[in-house]
Image: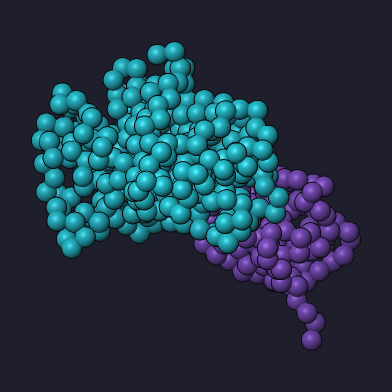
Chain colours: A cyan, B purple
Amino acid sequence: MKVTLWGTRGSLATPGTATARYGGNTSCASVHGPDGTILVLDAGTGIRPLGMTLPRSLRRVDICLTHLHLDHIQGLGFFAPLYNPAVEVHIWGPASTTMSLQDRLMRYLSPPLFPVRLRELPCKLSLHETPCADFTIGEFHIASALICHPGPTVGYRITTADATLAYVTDHEPALGVPEFPMSGAWTSGYELAAEADLLIHDAQYSSEEYARYVGWGHSSLQHAITFAALAKVQHVVLFHHDPGHTDQDIDRLTSEAIAATQPTFAVTAGAEGCVFELGSR
Amino acid sequence: MAQQEIEVILVRQLASYLAMPMVIVDPAGTLLFYNEPAEELLGMRFEETGELTQDEWVDDLGLTDEQGMPVAPEARPLVIALNERRPAHKTMWGQSRDGVRRHVEVTAFPLIGQAGRALGAVAIFWEVKQA
């Protein structure tokens, strides 16, 4: 499978010269399967440039939302396939305990927040509620599970015959843990990430910042690497960069986190345009 | 290694910070976690016992009601919370592993997760103080 990062920023789109290298778009990644299936992970502002690259022959695309915080859905209304009647768009995401996924999405995709209503979109739209379910899309087997973040939030584990991607962003596995990490059995997101070839994980804060934002639902860079070590992944991508972090900050924080944790696997600070090829096909 | 559900993980984190005795069981009644105040009440330490099956931890308690009669399983708050998915409360006597017999109030409630998943139950305890 081929994984491409289209938006790596957390919380708020952050354009500008100081963030040009890692990028200012909010969360979005695409996954192209060996047989042509296309998955989109989250619909932050990075989904707009992704939509512009998709072929005109596209007939189906699946969008897997982790949750409905604005930085993960803000680009949805600007995703070109939504306006193509020939395309099936399937949106997967969590319901809440009291509202369906459709009702939750309609809060954003309706006036006055957005001029086009969900029901007015020309594409063939289907909505699917994901928490705690395994499902199949094309050649991908997908597991989803609730993870530690305020409000209903899921992570995804996407598997083909020879590769596994874990997408676990907006995740605070260290919340309330006296000494992080605990065992895998008592760590949020562990099963999603266990022995993945590639883990894309929240790394919003420096360790000093994390101490001020405990409970906000995000991880420090060190926590992300520690979690990756617990899960025995091959490669972790640090993702959901804080909007206050410049490219230079991210370089420095990544170096410091690696020095502090001494990982035995690859660590990459996620940048827009990064491509990762997993498996042999 | 199977991972606990996120709701159960978060309840454990909460319990570990609370000063009142609290135990967490899975849908089969296995004792998944008990906090330090509950350690005092049960007369054992979680670090030493780890998880305990229902047989391993309930049978030894010798639960009796206010009249000294054994409390039937179906009348125990945790069993009601698990089987009937509703909160339950009862005052009972029980004996901890250190041999001390205690008079306690027990309130149990079910843990029902997203999509109606039955994840287990939680019980909290108060020791009844004699007037």
From where the camera sits, is residue A194 visible? no
Q: Residue furthest top?
A: A280
Residue A200, percent from left and from top: 48, 36
Q: Residue furthest right?
A: B99
Q: Is residue A213 left or right of residue A22?
A: right
Residue B94 lies, with reference to residue A207, above or below; the image says below
Residue B76 lies, with reference to residue A164, above or below; the image says below
Which quadrant does the N terminus of chain B fall into?
A: top right
Query: In the image shown, does B99 or A169 lie closer to the viewer?
Result: A169
From where the camera sits, is residue A271 visible? yes
Q: Residue at x 65, y 32 (%)?
A: A263
Across the whole image, how many numbered discs are drawn on residues? Answer: 0
Q: Is residue B77 left or right of residue A22?
A: right
Q: Residue at x 14, y 49 (%)?
A: A119
Q: Residue furthest front?
A: A17
Q: Quadrant of residue A91?
A: top left
Q: Is residue B120 left or right of residue A39?
A: right
Query: In the image shown, does A217 or B69 lie closer to the viewer?
Result: A217
Q: Quadrant of residue B99?
A: bottom right
Q: Quadrant of residue A123?
A: top left
Which quadrant does the C terminus of chain B fall into?
A: bottom right
Residue B107, percent from left and from top: 63, 67
Q: Residue at x 34, y 22 (%)?
A: A33
Residue A232, percent from left and from top: 61, 30
Q: Residue at x 25, y 58 (%)?
A: A107
Residue A58, percent from left and from top: 19, 26
Residue A217 lies, with reference to residue A224, above or below; the image says below
Query: In the image shown, does A210 or B67 lie closer to the viewer?
Result: A210
